[in-house]
Image (cartoon, grey):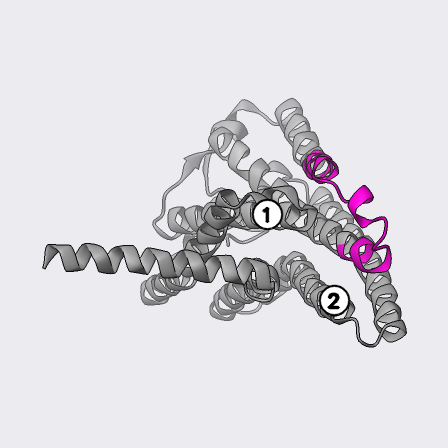
Amino acid sequence: MASQNASVDEQMQLIQVDPVRRNISLALTQIIVWPFIYLIFLMLLIFSKIETFRTETRYILFGHSLLVDLIFLCLTDLIVLLSYNFVLIPLHFCIPICMLTEAIAVSAPLTIGAMCVERYVAICMPLRHHAISTSRRAIMVILLIWILSSINPFVDMFILVSTASHEYLSQLTHCHYEIMIPEKIRHVARGLLYIVGLVVILIIEVFCYVMIYLAARAASGDKSASKGQRTISLHIIQLFLCTSEVICPYIESVVMQYDIQSYLTVRFINFLAFSITSRAVSPLVYGFRDEKFYAAMAYYIRCKNNVISSGTEKQT
């Protein structure tokens, strides 16, 4: 949530502009973030307990998506807490946090693309689906996603360590990825590269959507095709939110030049509307819309409530 272009002193000045605004923003962030953390953790717990989910490709990718979202929300909330409580950390300690956050941010849209392709194969190639979409290949796709997501952070880390002075690496700062790319041109190049990647994923998703739409028209009674079409529509919305999350820092930097209060408001709204909301779509897509997973969630919650009720009755 830290400013994408501000230095440490500027960030401290921005945070201290209005203590009341700072405290309200921090409280609202915790109120909004932690229910999603709890929900995603609950879904991961259910995923780990049921063997069917651990062997089907779509659920393996969904589980990976949940794990990525959970780590992102926890890291983001940690950074927000440190920033709003004026906690500065030596830069070399921030580097691993920044690298992990960046890798997770990149892996999220890649996972979305993989899930769309899986739905395309399941609906448009039903006879070959079980041969193509195996659990082993799903693990290989996840491994490939992490390799692709980690390339840029490691390159930036090696460049930073090779070129930055000891004083720069030892300074106290807030943890945000821009400390690893102090040159403005690299900051712009990173944004452009990320947007190009998102456009490629969007093209893949639109292709899958069109093919599934044609399959739904060819088989008007096929509910799976219509449902898959709606699922990919939600994935496209999720990708749009990820794209907006990348563009927002550049808009914020322009607003900051005119009015700091407006900048703080825009930054906070962008954080909640795009960074948090984009991570809330995954539970919506599969957690509540998928009948099998929803049934497992309802069963788990019902059993847990029965256990609590039984324990209360024994105590009374």
The quadrant in which the C terminus is found is bottom left
Residue 297 in sight from this viewpoint:
yes
Q: Image check: 102 left or right of 29?
A: right
Magenta region, mostly helix, strand or loop? Answer: helix
Q: Is residue 97 above or below residue 75?
A: above
Q: CA distance from mark 1 to mark 2?
A: 18 Å
* Residue at image location 62% in from the left, 51% down from the top: 62
**Callout 1 secondary element:** helix
Q: Image check: 123 left or right of 160?
A: right
Q: Is residue 62 above or below residue 164?
A: below
Query: How far across and how far down the image is residue 298, in percent?
Result: 45, 62
Which mark is drawn over residue 110? none
Q: Image check: 107 left or right of 44?
A: right
Query: How far across and how far down the image is residue 259, in percent?
Result: 52, 69
Magenta-tinted stretch: 119-148
Amino acid carrying label 2: it is Ser
Which residue is denoted by mark 1 in the rendering?
53
Give 303 or 269, whichever is nearer the viewer. Answer: 303
Q: Is residue 117 above or below residue 244?
A: above
In contact (CB < 8 Å): disc 1 and disc 2: no
Query: How far across and how far down the image is residue 29, in percent?
Result: 41, 61
Q: Image check: 106 left or right of 276?
A: right
* Residue at image location 77% in from the left, 47% down from the top: 193
Decide whether residue 109 is among the magenta residues: no
Amino acid carrying label 1: it is Phe
Residue 7 in sight from this viewpoint:
no
Which mark is drawn over residue 224? 2
Q: Earlier along the polypeptide chain: callout 1 or callout 2?
A: 1
